[in-house]
Image (tube, grey):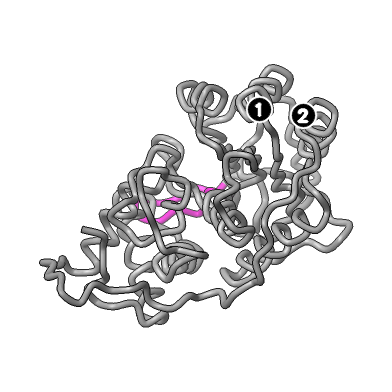
Amino acid sequence: MFIETIASIALATSALTPTVVPQATPAQSEPSEPHRLEDLVVTGRHRDEIIRDFVENVADPVAGRPLARWRSEVCVSVINMESQSAHFIVERISHVAREVGLRSGGPRCKPNLVLVASANPAGEAQGLVQRYRRLLKPNMTGASQGRAELARFQESDAPIRWWHINQVTDQNGRRAFRAPGDTPFDKSSLHEAAYVSVMPSRLWSSYSEDINYAVAIFNPRELEHLTALQLADYLSLVTLAQISPTASTANYDSILNVTDANYVTEADQLTQWDWAYLKGLYSATRTQSNLSASRVEIASSISRAADRLNLSRDPEVNP
């Protein structure tokens, strides 16, 4: 299996020795409100407007496709880390996955989300792409980001990088279209077919964009200022959702700011803002065929999640 091969290649090629990430006691999944400056007057915008801007700024679907998300089970594997640190990250990401309605894999599950610790993340990414380019960028519309994004995945100097591989599925979770290498369609075994053909309407879709598997590569030596909880929650957000690696999030109270050396954040874990985004993404029905309408649907779902989390109608943003 491809994702298992990635794990073996990472173990064989990484120059990183087992690394201990500073441990942090798991905190509550939904943190308290950040500190507010009482003597600072900020002219706020309506929360729903901020949510729409956040979705437009941070969400990173494949061009021309709706946002993808995991459908059912997430099985996390961490490579090249000391076992206690790796276990903490696996457990935390699995907890976040369960909180948004997914299942977390058991001890012997087949990994579909692999996290690789490496002292040379660019070299690690380049090696994976050289060996498995067709698998990281399948010859199927909407399966992954484009060539420019794949080049950025390999060449970036960011301490954390990630890559999602998606598939289009029907309402029953079956792959909706044939892929290169599939066997010819056999009408006599329709109930066993790995793909189906359902005609969507112009307004409503019978398909959904699902994350099939994902890889993230990170350099613990450049992230020593983070606690284990901050690292795990950052990885949770960028692997459970399609997040733009170039998004500017300084104006939002988000865990995404912890890797920005030019910005000081008090986020010690996923913030209420981050939780609203994830829970909104995973509670949206995703039935709109129109891409603009689909984003509005996601934003509305995030707004409802924010209500459930008691997030202020006029949330604080950093001035």
Q: Nearer the viewer, residue 238 or 241?
A: 238
Q: Residue at image x 42%, y 43%?
A: 261
Q: Quick one: quadrant of the C terminus?
A: bottom left
Asked if residue 285 can be seen in this view, the reply is no
Label tally? 2
Q: Residue at image x 26%, y 71%?
A: 315
Q: Quadrant of residue 60?
A: top left
Q: Which residues are magenta?
A: 198-210
Identify the element where label 1 is drawn.
Answer: loop
Q: Is residue 266 left or right of residue 187?
A: left
Amino acid marked by disc 2 = Ser
Say few, some or many: other residues with alpha carbon within 10 Å of mark 2 (under 14 / 14 to 19 / 20 or more): some
Q: First in sequence, mark 1 or 2: give its number.
A: 2
Asked if the magenta segment contains residue 208, the reply would be: yes
Disc marking residue 177: none
Residue at mark 1: 120
Q: Nearer the viewer, residue 310 or 43?
A: 43
Q: Quadrant of residue 115?
A: top right
Asked if residue 283 can be seen in this view, the reply is yes
**Callout 1 touching callout 2 (CB < 8 Å):** yes
Q: Tell me: residue 205, above or below residue 248.
A: below
Image location (x, y in percent) of residue 156: 50, 27
Q: Residue furthest right?
A: 108
Residue at mark 2: 14
Asked if the magenta segment contains residue 250, the reply would be: no
Q: Residue at image x 52%, y 65%?
A: 269
